[in-house]
Every structure is written in structure tokens, then in C-alpha cells.
Image (cartoon, rainbow, N blue to C red):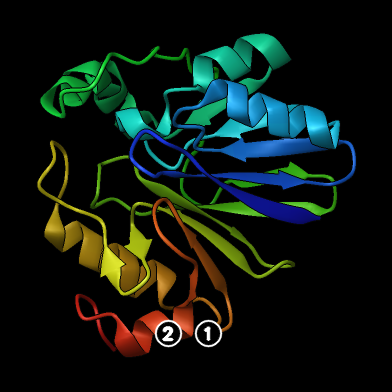
Amino acid sequence: MEIERLTLKLLAENCYIYHNEKECIIFDPGSDYEYIKSYLEKKNLSVKLILLTHCHFDHVGAVSDLKEYYNAKVMCHKDDLLMLKSANKSAANYGLMPVKIPDIDDFFSDNDIIYFNDAELKVIHTPGHSAGSVCFYEEMDKILISGDTLFLESVGRTDFPSGSQDELEKSIRNKLYVLPDDTMVLPGHGFHTTIKHEKEYNPFIHI
């Protein structure tokens, strides 16, 4: 299994393609549908699932087009549905054009396992950045797709609707910092890091 990062143009959000030689899961395709589709075509990949770490507008903008073109199933946490419905109000606050609001096919919950070939992606509900924020942990490949919960030496904002600083700190301390130190953290914006690095150097939530 391989994972590739595509940094998209809308707000420099990271979209991840987790794949073998034939099919993939897409995490947070926030914009640039044609760019993502071109990458998939170059790799000759079909799309099994589209998984959302949360439903802010900059993480969902290309979902509808990808879902339609690849007939892919879309999943998120139910606690972010309200956020999804207000995505274009949030985009307008940034002076940006509306995005297509995708239909959600199913919901995952904390500790659910999403099976993809030999991989097992564990859903970790990490409220704080938004009520329905989640991370995805794959133990075999030692990767954590952290969305906007945890960044390189930073954390997600909590001043948006349904955000909570207390919840964010609990999520990171109790659910992420307990993962193996060598877990690679792949955030929704910026560069990758590790759990060990964040525990030692993250100025917002330090152990």
C-alpha cells in the first residue's frame, strides 16, 4: 500500500490517496477535481471510498464530482452534517465561491474499522476542530490521517461553529498521543510529522 499527498489550491489543503496498484481511498478531496482525476487516471486507479475527516468547505469541494464520476461511496461522522450544510456560508466568509455540497452515503463512528484490502483503518473520533472531526489510524503502515485536528507543531482552530478547545485538547492527549511514537501524522494542511515530535515540540499541547 502507498499513500500520496496532493496539496490543493483552495486553501492549500491536503488530499491523500491511499492505494494499491488498482484502487484507492481518497481522503478530503477539498478542491481541484480535474487535478485529482488526472492523478487517478495517470495511476489507473479506481475509487473505492471517499472518507472525510470533517466537513469544512475546504475539505469537501471536489467530493460531489468524484463521487459521481467514480460512483464512489462517501462517508463522514454524523456530528458534522450541520457543518456540511453550512459549508457555503463559511466559504462566503472567506470571499470564496460556493462549493458543491456532497451527498453522504453512510456514517462512521468512533472505533469503527474500515477495511481496504489488507489494511484496517481505525476511525478515531477527535472532536474539537469540529464536533464530527475524526482521524484515521492504520497500524500496519503506521500512519495517522489527522485532518485539521493535529498539525506539525500546531493544532486545529476551535473558533468555528461546533469547535471546542477543551475537546480538542482531550482528543489529542487521550486519543492521539497514546499512539506509537513513530506513527507518521499526515495533516489536513502543511507537512507531515510524528506523534513523538508533537509530544515533544508542539507548543499548544505538550507532554
Q: How many marks?
A: 2
Residue at 16% in and 20% down: 92
The image position of residue 183, as x and y in percent, is 57, 75
Q: Write the residue at 42% across / 27% down.
A: 60
Badge 1 element: loop
Q: Position of residue 142 (x, y in %)?
A: 65, 70
Residue at point 70%, 47% (across, down) = 18
Residue that carries the numbered disc 2 in the rendered image: 197
Say which quarter of the image contains residue 173. bottom left
What residue would you read off at disc 1? 181
Neighbor class of circle 1 (other Cα within 10 Å; few <14, some 14-19, many 20+) is: some
Q: Residue at x 27, y 63 (%)?
A: 155
Answer yes or no: is residue 71 visible: no
For the residue pair 9 and 174, the one nearer the viewer reads as 9
The quadrant where residue 98 appears: top left
Q: Nearer the viewer, residue 91 or 52?
A: 91
Q: What's the CA distance linking mark 1 and mark 2?
A: 8 Å
User: Does residue 30 appear left or right of residue 163 in this picture?
Assistant: right
